[in-house]
Image (cartoon, grey):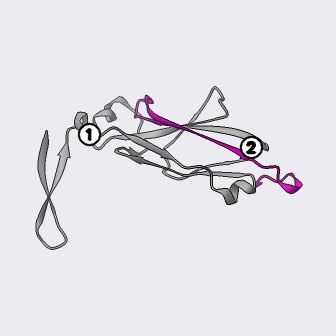
Amino acid sequence: MSLPVFAQGDVGGASPIAVVAIENEAAPRLIVDQPLPGPLAKGQVFIGYRTENIRIVPVYNKGALDVSPRIGHLHVTVDGTPWHWADASNEPIILVGLPPGPHKVLVELADPTHMVVASKAVEFVVPAVAGGQHGH
């Protein structure tokens, strides 16, 4: 069901904005980029991402499941470790200090109760850097 809502427009008139019931919203989508090549060449991993049909905010509770448009956060796991961290910064994922070699970062889009609704994995190789410096 869509309800008409009016907002003040730039030209002084009212323009309709569709309000959609949460169960009718499009599915959340996660787009994750490969690490930026410049920093990666120096041993620094910068992974950009964006979401569609969900806003990234630091809210973690069952009551937030009914918020429209949807809200959520990220879970980030590096190299298959048994733990992850939650991120709601809306900033690129930045990793420094990874040893040279292949790595895999799993980025999961989660709802406010930590249920994963979408995920993407990014694989890359951290090169050996002259002098052993990895962005420290």
Residue at the spot 17% in from the left edge and 50% down from the top edge: 18
The reply, left or right, for residue 3 in relation to residue 35 is left
Q: Position of residue 6 (x, y in %)?
A: 12, 57
Q: Quadrant of the C terminus?
A: bottom right
The residue under label 1 is 25
Q: Position of residue 99 (x, y in %)?
A: 78, 42
SS class, disc 1: loop
The reply, left or right, for residue 3 in relation to residue 59 is left
In the displayed image of the protein, which residue is found farthest to the bottom? 11
Residue bounds of the magenta highlight:
109-136
Q: Which mark sits nearer the N-terminus, 1 or 2?
A: 1
The residue under label 2 is 98
The reply, left or right, for residue 70 in relation to residue 130 is left
In the displayed image of the protein, which residue is found farthest to the top? 82
Residue at the spot 62% in from the left edge and 29% down from the top edge: 83
Residue at the spot 19% in from the left edge and 71% down from the top edge: 10
Occupied quadrant, residue 69: top left
Q: Position of residue 75 (x, y in %)?
A: 53, 36
